[in-house]
Image (cartoon, coloured by chain):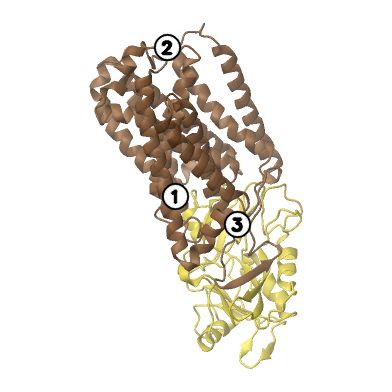
Amino acid sequence: MVVSGVTLIPSAPRIWPALGLLLLLVALGLASAWTMETQGHHITGMTNRIVWGLPHVCAIFLILTASGALNVASVASVFGRSDYKPLAPLSALLAIALLTGGLAVLVLDLGRPDRLLVAMLHQNPFSIFAWNVLLYSGFIAVAGVYLWTMLVRRQNRHTAAAGVVALVWRLVLTTGTGSIFGFLAGRAAFHSAMMAPLFVAASLADGLAVFMLVLAGLAAFGGPVPDTALRRRLGRLLGILTAASLYFALVLHLTWLYAPDSRAVSGFLLLHGGVFPVLFWGGQVVLGTAVPLWLLFRCAGREVLAASLVALGGLEQLGVLLIGGQAVPQSLLPGWELHSAFGDGSAAAYAPSLPEALLGVGGFALALLLVLLGCRLLRILPARLSEVSA
Amino acid sequence: MSHGPTRRRLLAAAITVAPGLLLVAEAAPRAPGSPVTAHTRWGLLIDVARCNAGCTACVDGCRHEQGWGGAASDGPWIRKIEATERQTNRSVSLPVMCQHCAEPPCVEVCPTGASLRRADGIVLVDRHRCIGCRYCVMACPFDARFFVDTEVHDQRPYTPRGKGTAEGCTLCVHRLDAGRLPACVEACASAGGAMLFGDLIDPTSEISQALRARASTALRAELGLASAIRYQGL
């Protein structure tokens, strides 16, 4: 099947106000990053105990959803479901846009973003972080080529091969992202081989949720309105992936709870860690999984609401994992109660500030801006609804 | 590095307060231009029985020497921890700083190689290569690596610090290279006298002899990082 896509027309309703709003949010994000760099990170809620905060939650969420946004394209190109093909270009464009937004937040949150060139020229081959720099840059290139094979008719014959490369690449990418945490042997709340599959599952669920939200949002700007059958198919897939994501989180906690030396980690994150148990049970489990599953499998026509909740639950999951994981006191002397002026033995506190929140929001805005521009300039979207549901 | 008598000097402050335990040992100066080699590995043995609760001489000495602590958000390059064993209720006080691991997680994870381990085992940060990603802070099992999040004033000429970069205990590498002891060790000698500093490789050094004679342990020994900082009496 050949995709005959169309562009959003300039006269589409609300497109210019939306572009203006997104540009404003991107500008606010940049201004926040500039303020953080010139004044220093002391203006954020991040400290020497919570060194990665809200910007990292947003950045990693965007990176994970970039990988998961390719679900639809992979299903079409790799698994041969031709009914998804008309939406495959949007899937690839969204993946590139989300990763760009995530990378922008990560880079702008650096203590010395002006030294980005240093990171390019001097790479430590043993650093999982350095591996991820290559994985992220490569992902944009791979997804770009994949998109190109879909948009240029005479390159369509290469789409399947590009789709396989993109599928493998994004699985490696999310494995690498999870391993940024899973490889930290000194941190009980992170060190686990479960982190990689957990991140893969979360990316598949959250990425599909974001894809469904963007597809629904584009309809407001003249994009195609997916029919009931397509919405239900995507919704069922979302339900399965969301349940899988929670499954990995539960297995991780069961593993921690089983061993006495790591029981304190789960105890903190699930029971007595202040806001983190609320985010886990209320955010990820109830609002992010149980309610969406009920909506997807028991209530027809609630797919967009369910996708919104899954995405929100995914953000909360990362908040618990990343920030809660750092808030858990490190056990320098197992079996001892510790006290110090630095806070040894007690949970670390974190309250995000406006600049770091704006930086995170700016990443989302940049991703959406790129999607909107891409849909305006390239033949990304299917021409007719019948193509979507064919 | 030569250990010849002409290159050695015993510090005047070196005192012996217990049989066989020299609290501060000598450090041989490195000749200008001579390379740091792996023939030396500097380390510390800290006797927690001699470390008094409430005493912050090592912390004060380090802060004065290195110039950190001017901002409220500065990370403590060395800090005192009061610890009580849950099963026995025994309490001890101990200083914790960068443990100068043989296999430092901060060095492994650093994307640019800014976190580095010198041939003599001292773990440092190249401030000119650090991009401020804080992954080393995440990776440190001892909470001993920090991020400078505000403008730095009153910098010491021998210890550059910079907003937006990581930092931590340097084991007073500038003093060691000049044949002097780390500031914390020197300060402790005139307080509790709990720190023994020296070359872990040289079998004749006081610290090597003390480590052979007495039981000691590393913090988080289960990680297998082979720290250069050992604790006696835990």
Q: Please tell me whether residue A165 is drawn above or below residue B179 in the rendered image.
A: above
Q: Is residue A137 visible?
A: no
Residue that carries the numbered disc 1 in the rendered image: A249
Q: Please tell me whether residue A43 is drawn above or below residue B113 in the rendered image.
A: above
Which of the chains bears the disc numbered 3?
Answer: A
Q: Please tell me whether residue B120 is drawn above or below residue A30 in the rendered image.
A: below
Disc number for residue A272: 3
Q: Is residue A387 visible?
A: yes
Residue that carries the numbered disc 2 in the rendered image: A7
Q: Earlier in the sequence, mark 2 or mark 3?
A: 2
Disc nearest the viewer among 2 and 1: 1
For the residues bearing labels 2 and 1, Cβ distance under 8 angstroms: no
Q: In the structure shown, which secondary structural element does the residue marked by tag 3 occupy?
A: helix
Image coords of residue A358 (percent x, y): 64, 33
Indicate left or right for A39 with B29 as reference.
right
Disc nearest the viewer among 1 and 3: 3
Residue at mark 1 shares a chain with residue at mark 3: yes
Three-letter code, disc 3: His
Which image quarter: residue A352? top right
Q: Hey, which residue is sitting farthest top in the picture?
A: A11
Which of the chains bears the disc numbered 2?
Answer: A
